[in-house]
Structures are given as structure tokens and as C-alpha cells.
Amino acid sequence: MTILFFLLLPWIPWGNRQAVWFNLSEQKFHVFGLVIWPQDLTLLAGLFVIAAVGLFFITTYLGRVWCGYTCPQTVWTFIFIWLEEKIEGARNKRIKLDQMPWTRDKVVRKTLKHSAWVLVSLVTALTFVSYFVPATTLYKQFFLFESSAGVYFWVVFFTIATYGNAGWMREIMCIHMCPYARFQASMFDKNTYIVGYDSKRGEKRGPRSRKTDPKALELGDCIDCDLCVQVCPTGIDIRNGLQYECINCGACIDACDNTMERMGYDKGLISYTTENKLEGNAAKILRPKLVGYGVGLIVMLLLFIYGAANIAPVRLDVIRDRNQLFRETDQGLVENTYTLKILNKTEQPHHYTLSVTGLPKDVQWLGRQQIEVAAGEVLSLPMSLAVDPYQLGRSMTKIDFIVSTTINGNIETAKQESRFFSE
Ligand code: SF4
Ligand code: SF4
């Protein structure tokens, strides 16, 4: 699912662009109908906070399911392992293949495996880059050698990174480099779901034939076949108890269930369980830490939805002329000069009206007050205000510039404070 989502998302169209497009050159992020500008980056920060609180909530409840099922490192590692098994066979066959001299069969299998890994890595890299460069353009230009040097650099970089991580680094990333493994313990409690081995049922472990009654040999259900260790991507033995290297992938559960089935025993010697359950106590789902994370998550989500629904479609910035505070005109008026920057954050051109408040009614606006701004453009408009100084009570007056437009029948405005100097 994660992979399908990742692969297909850049191909979903939205109007005349792709639905999810991080347009770095124009500094705006498109997420379906939402356009996030650098000025709205608090929203993006909010998204990261939601992701973090969501991760805390899920981890407290279900343990490291993120690591086991959605972390790209795990997902890609399992794809690479699957390819390896299809091409070189099961673990014992692979060990034999590695030890044997370089025969034609070995060369063919190794070449095939690494070619498959490189192909998956290349598709991964192209997909990742297509979140930043429109997918249709990227694929066409890439294979016709018409992409920019930057695009080739990043595609090659991510191809090597994927190949190295999922093909060679694998569990080294999880055990030694991933910071999440280090602080997950602080989120765990005795009711958190973990992958656990039922030692009361499994011990004393030991090999036996299918027909033997383990009780007669004073053995538990673990036949010490070692399959749970062999399939573990981080190379641990779950029978030694909960370890920070365990990424909750469940591969040992499937391996052990197969063994149990073969032996005619009940499945579940290794299972998703809690420490409380393993100790024979009742499971408790609602606990203060989980409720706290849940409430935090809901509040953050509501704030984010409110923020996203209320992104202003226009932004106004005002820059005062830095060279001169004011100047007197031939008619005895005081004139202040500004540059107004009007940003049309929508994807259609709009007509805007500019005005100012805080000055006498007969203030003279020297410059354009009606403007058209193209979609996604910033228009810089130099202009001046001229006022009779006798109508101003102070040497410095606080004023507000206002830009307004009508979008879908609604009047949208943006306001920016500034100063008018007369002495
Ligand atoms: S112990 Fe089991 S669940 Fe944990 S990482 Fe190894 S195979 Fe996956
Ligand atoms: S797979 Fe199950 S039976 Fe085999 S060693 Fe592991 S726990 Fe024991």
C-alpha cells in the first residue's frame, strides 16, 4: 500500500498540473487544491507536528508498527529480500551460492539480482524526484537525456542511496543510525503491543520429532528450529525478550506459525501481544499517556484543518522608501513613497483594488489603484501618498494599506500596517 501510494501519487492530475508537486523553483507546494507558499510554512510545520504526535500515539498503542510496515527502509528492504529469494533461493541456498566458485550460474544469478535491485532503485529515485519535477516532463526528458544536470545528479544520488540502504545496509540503518529506535522506549508501557515470545509456553525449547509428545520429554512448544532468527531483518532472537532492534515487522510470527502448523501445535507462540498479556494480566487500552497523545492529535488536526481552510488567497507587503522619510511638493503637501508587493496566491489571475486608511479623506494616491495580477505572481507597485500636513495631528501617523478582490463571490482582503511621516 505504502509503495503504491508513493508510486502513483505523482501521476494523479489536478487541473493542468499534478496534484502533489513541490515546486521549488517557484517556491510553492501544491497538495491537491491547496497551494502552500513560503509565507504559509507554519502550516507545513503544523503537518510535521501532527506526524510526530500521530507517531507517538500509534507507538504507545501499537508499538513500532511504523518501523515494521510503513518505514521506507523496511518496505524497500523487504522488496530487495524478496527479489533476492526469487533469484538466489532461500537462505541456505544463498549461503551455498556465496561460498561456491564463480560458475556461469552464479554469475547469471548475481547479475540478475543486482540488475533487479538497480532497476527498483532507479524507479524509486525517479518517483521521488517526480514530486519536485512534474512526472510527465521528468520521464520524457530523463530518457531523452534532456534533463538538467541537477535532475541527473539527484536521480543518481537517490538510486545509489536506495541500492545501498535496502541492498547492503539494511538492519545497520535500523540498529545504528535510526534515532527513532533510541527514544521509542519512552513511549512504551506494559500495554503497548509488541512482538513477543510466550516463554511460558515455549520453554524448555528443544528439537523433537512430530510424533513425540513434548510433555513426555518435558519440553515446551519451541522446537528450536531457529527460523524466527533467520527471517528477522535485524538479526535478533525474539526469544531473548523485547529488544530495541525489533522493528515489529512480524516476519518471525509468520515463520513460527508455519513451524507450529507443521508440528500440529497451536499458532501464536510468537505473536502481537503486550507485556501484561504475556504475564497473564488483563489488557488495558485506555491509559493517561495514550489519551493525552490522542487529544493532542485531535487538537492539532483541527487547528491544521482550520489553518488550511483559511489560507489567505492574497498577500500584501509594504516597503517604505528608505532614502527619504518624506518630501514636500510644490503645492505644500507632504509626500511619502512606498513599494507595494501584491502576491496572488491563487491559480487564476485576479483584479485587485488598493486603498489606504488612517489618513484624511482627501489623501492623494499617486500611482495605480486598480491592478491585475497573474496567477501565482508577485506584482511590485511603486506609489506615493500626498497629504496636507495641517490635517495631520502628529509627525508620524499609523496607516493601513488594504488590497481587496472578489473570488467566487467572496470579498477577500489583505491588510498591511505602515507609517506616514510628515516632519
Ligand atoms: S524480532 Fe520479529 S518482529 Fe522483531 S524485527 Fe525480528 S522478525 Fe521482525
Ligand atoms: S520459529 Fe518458533 S519454534 Fe522455531 S525457534 Fe523460533 S520460536 Fe522456536
Image (cartoon, rainbow, N blue to C red):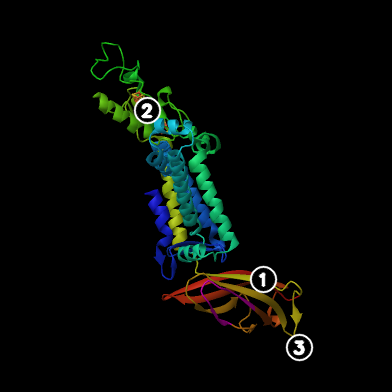
Identify the amino acid type marked 3: Asp
In terms of secondary structure, where does tag 3 sit?
Answer: loop
In terms of secondary structure, where does tag 2 sit?
Answer: helix
Identify the amino acid type marked 2: Leu
Q: Residues within 10 Å of mark 2 (few under 14, many from 20)?
A: some
Q: Does mark 1's beta carbon lie closer than 8 Å to ligand 1?
A: no
Q: Which of disc 3 and disc 2 is earlier in sequence?
A: 2
Asked if the residues shown at circle 1 and circle 3 are in contact, with their CB atoms under 8 angstroms apart, the answer is: no
In magenta segment, residue 207 = no
- How far apart marks 1 and 3 lie (CA) works out to 25 Å
Q: Is residue 388 above or below residue 348?
A: below
Q: Does mark 2's beta carbon lie closer than 8 Å to ligand 2?
A: yes
In terms of secondary structure, where does tag 1 sit?
Answer: strand
Q: Is residue 280 left or right of residue 375?
A: left
Total number of numbered labels? Answer: 3
Q: Does mark 3's beta carbon lie closer than 8 Å to ligand 1?
A: no
Q: Which of disc 3 and disc 1 is earlier in sequence?
A: 1
